[in-house]
Image (cartoon, rainbow, N blue to C red):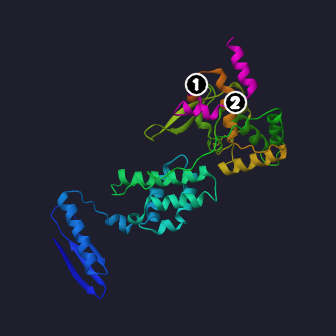
Amino acid sequence: MASIVKRGDYQYQVTVRRKGYPKQCKTFESEREAKAWASVIESEMVRGVFTDRSELERTTLGELLSRYEEEVTHCKIGARQELSRIKCWKAHPLALRPLAALRAVDFSQYRDVRLKQVGPNTVRLELALISAIFNHARKDWSMAVENPIKGIRAPKIPGGRERRLVGDEEDRLLTTASEARANPKQLKAAIQLAIETGLREGRLAALRWEQIDLREGVVWVMTKDEEHKQRLVPVPLTEKAVDVLRELPRDISGFVFGRAFRTEQALGSAFRRARDRAGLSNLRFHDLRHEAASRMAPLMPMATLAKVMTWKTLQMAMRYYNPTPSELVAALRATA
């Protein structure tokens, strides 16, 4: 049953009460709007399709981002990158809007404006974060919220990178790394391990000796399974990788690279300085993961390569395996 109380010249407070449902209250500027709203709410309750949206009306996107940051993000492997995206979202005007007022068009407009500022993959990751947050809020926090990202067009991503080390580039890169002013031994070792194992710079920077079993020849790294639960998986070491690790000094910190590269950013910055001194254009640390996969691919079945590289699907092999024309010729003739 709905009741409407006039609170002022332009304030009509309507209250809807019905057994089995939480009390619903809302204030309007006219009695006509109040009656119309009450009629819709009562009709939904009678038909059994009513959803309490009061929580969505009093919760902003920024508040939802903060809760997700505190309860979910800090437990993730890629927390640093996600925290950066959350910070970006919190600075956007959409963060001030209540969840009930957000529509798909708001995010499609965000996409179009953002694409003029950053690359399509950055926009894709930012929208994927919001999508994950809305899904988590609905499933884990029982919030009556729909995912506004679900129906919008994703940014078009250009073809993947295929940058490989060619000619004497590897020698030049290792030479400039070994001549670095700070931590030359550790920097050269990090680059060699990236090429030999395919480990990302974040995993290398955070690598501890307790994760390494030189006798078995593996490094244990944390990853997520299909249910997004974290688990340890082994990454095999080549003989050269074992030799590189044996030559590294150990200190009390327990980190493989000691205090040289305590963060991913520190390792990335040192790599870029060595790269620039070597005169290598358009080379990123992550390209070394492509290099590792491309060198391993001809030597083993794709299913084995996926396990070595900690991929969840075989399709990732097509993304990371970037053979040169001469390598393809050699692979074909090896079958003859």
The one of 84 and 120 positioned closer to us in this rendering: 120
- Magenta-span inclusion, residue 317: yes
Residue 173 figure quarter: top right
Q: Position of residue 101 (x, y in %)?
A: 40, 66
Q: Residue at 29% of width from left, 77% of height from top?
A: 27
Residue 213 in sight from this viewpoint: yes
Q: Residue at 66% of width from left, 36% of height from top?
A: 289
Say which element carries label 1: helix
Q: Position of residue 146 (x, y in %)?
A: 38, 55
Could you tell me how many numbered marks the image carries? 2
The one of 32 and 243 positioned closer to us in this rendering: 32
Magenta extent: 307-336
Q: Is residue 214 left or right of residue 269?
A: left
Amino acid carrying label 2: it is: Ala
Say which element carries label 2: helix
Classify 57 as above or below 164.
below
Residue 241 image label: 2
Q: Position of residue 326 (x, y in %)?
A: 76, 24
Kindly identify which residue carries mark 1: 302
Quarter in which the C terminus is drawn: top right
Q: Earlier in the sequence, mark 1 or mark 2?
A: 2
Amino acid carrying label 1: it is: Met
Residue 65 in sight from this viewpoint: no
Classify 2 as above or below 5.
above
Q: Which mark is nearer the camera, 1 or 2?
A: 1
Classify 299 as above or below 93.
above
Q: What is the spatial separation of the Cα atoms under label 1 and label 2, in whole angstroms?
A: 21 Å
Q: Is residue 13 left or right of residue 173?
A: left
The one of 113 and 244 positioned closer to us in this rendering: 113
- Magenta-span inclusion, residue 12: no
